[in-house]
Image: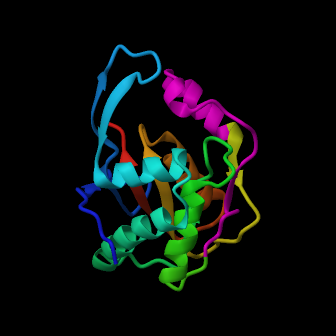
Amino acid sequence: MAVVKINPMKLPPRPWVEGYVLDYHTVSSTPTGDPYYRFDTTRTELGELLFRLKYRAGGSVVVAEIVDTVEHFVGGWKPPIDCVVPAPPSLTRKTEPAVEVARELAARLSLPVFEDAVVKMKTTPQMKNIDDWFERQRVLAEAVQAGSNDVKGKSVLLFDDLIESGSTLRRVVEVLLKDGGAQANYALVLTRTK
């Protein structure tokens, strides 16, 4: 088991019962002045693994390293969960990092993963690119909807790979509770922006 060093931070308690982000994504990012290599970025260990998975086709070895760390954390946390639900991705990729990690984590915890409990009905800009809070909420309410997987009465571990403001995660929890009938939500995110 290859567990990397993390710095878990508790998320504010609403709308989930309890939630954590495991570490920051970057330690520093300095402009270089080079148009081809624009920033010299130093990431946390987990941030580097996630970067490799999202942007460097990290594959199953990187997924396993990430899940080793997540499984170790969840083993100490012990949230009372019945299933794992990955947050719908903001961009369409050939493989979705949050989904890949959620699948492997659920398998190791012997829990079902419900990839379609919440779905993105239409493409949106990345939430970090929408400055107005009310506009962000409107866009998310239109795009993020209940899917075909049934979570009624279940205690859900909502999993995401990266969080900035938390708007998307909050909308997903709202959908799981109000439209999906989930009993409780616990949130777990790999990394956060500064």
Is 22 placed left or right of 59 in the picture? left
Residue 36 lies in the magenta stretch = no
Q: Quadrant of residue 90?
A: top right
Residue at the (48%, 82%) spot, across then down: 109
Residue 138 lies in the magenta stretch = yes
Q: Is residue 156 above or below residue 46?
A: below
Query: From the image, which quarter does the C terminus lie in?
Result: top left
Q: Is residue 126 above or below residue 69?
A: above
Q: Is residue 184 above or below residue 13?
A: below
Is 99 placed left or right of 20 in the picture? right
On the image, the x and y values in percent for residue 159 come to 49, 60
Residue at the (35%, 13%) spot, across then down: 33
On the image, the x and y values in percent for residue 119 come to 70, 53
The reply to whether residue 177 is visible in this rendering is no
Q: Quadrant of residue 43?
A: top left
Is 33 placed left or right of 63 in the picture? left
Q: Which residues are magenta?
A: 113-141
